[in-house]
Image: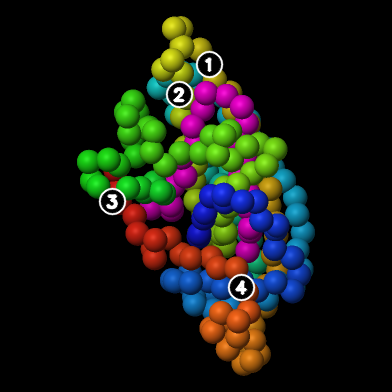
Amino acid sequence: MAFEELLVQERLLKAGDLLRFDGPWGDPYTNKVFRVTRTETTQRVRLVALSAPTRQHVIDIDDIGLNPEHKLFAYEVRIGVGQGLVKVYARWPTNDFTRQLQDPNFQINPADDDLKLIGFSDHVSSPFEDPRFRWFWVKDQLPSFLAMADSGTLAVPMYQKVRLRFIVNILGLVEETDSQTLQKVQSGELFVSTAQHYELLGRRSV
């Protein structure tokens, strides 16, 4: 799977667009270019209730029905976070957190008052109404998400709730085999969206 947090909103992929899978995605995707043949967009809202300040809630994508069931389909997902004192952290299938710093002394730890301020999403960075947190995933390569209450500024801890909005663009794919098209992609002459596998991005356990 691949992810990025968009600074400027981009449109969802549509039929005719190209998508390249960089890295060890497995058969049939690894380092190949696919053309989107059709799309269908839906959404899923998840309400998470947790108690502050230490309660955590893990969201397994497979448990809420967002697992592609067939090959040659990919999910392009935008994730928005509702208002509230809650931070959301994303994790690879290895349970390593995404968006880690390279310094081993400053690794994400949602239970630490300082280290919980690294690598999170909230309603400011990826609003519920305008999701900026984008993921690509395919069958059997699913992330999970950790919702963590952050009410350290409150005099009296209280239960926290947050809504997560998953906009799901279901992509039907066919491998691009036209040599001229592939040459233009390779040279940068033709735009292609890229899903860079997490093993290429590097990761560090906490």
Q: Is residue 162 left or right of residue 27?
A: right
Callouts 2 and 1 close, C-beta under 8 Å: no
Magenta-drawn segment = 74-94
**Amino acid type, residue under disc 4 in the picture:** Val
**Amino acid type, residue under disc 2 in the picture:** Asp
- Residue 33, visible in the rendered structure: yes
Callout 3 secondary element: loop
**Is 82 in front, or is 139?**
82
Going from the N terminus, do you reach mark 4 or mark 2 first?
A: 2
Marks 3/4: CA distance?
29 Å
Q: Is residue 90 magenta?
A: yes
Going from the N terminus, do you reach mark 3 or mark 4 first?
A: 3
Farthest residue, direction top: 156
Can you identify the residue that label 4 sits on? 192
Q: Which dot marks residue 102?
A: 3
Measured as percent of width and height from the top left, residue 171 is found at 69, 64
Is residue 129 depicted above or below 168 in this figure?
above
**Amino acid type, residue under disc 3 in the picture:** Gln
**Amino acid type, residue under disc 1 in the picture:** Tyr
Measured as percent of width and height from the top left, residue 106 is found at 27, 40
Marks 4/2: CA distance?
39 Å
Is residue 130 depicted above or below 179 in this figure?
above
Look at discs 2 and 1 and give the one toward the viewer.
Answer: 2
Can you identify the residue that label 1 sits on? 159
Is residue 162 depicted above or below 31 in this figure?
above
**Is 8 in front, or is 36?**
8
Magenta part, dominant SS: strand
Q: Which dot marks residue 150?
A: 2
**Residue at image location 32% in from the left, 47% down from the top:** 101
Residue density around tag 4, few if under 14, some if 14–19, many if 20 or more, within 10 Å: some
Going from the N terminus, do you reach mark 2 or mark 3 first?
A: 3
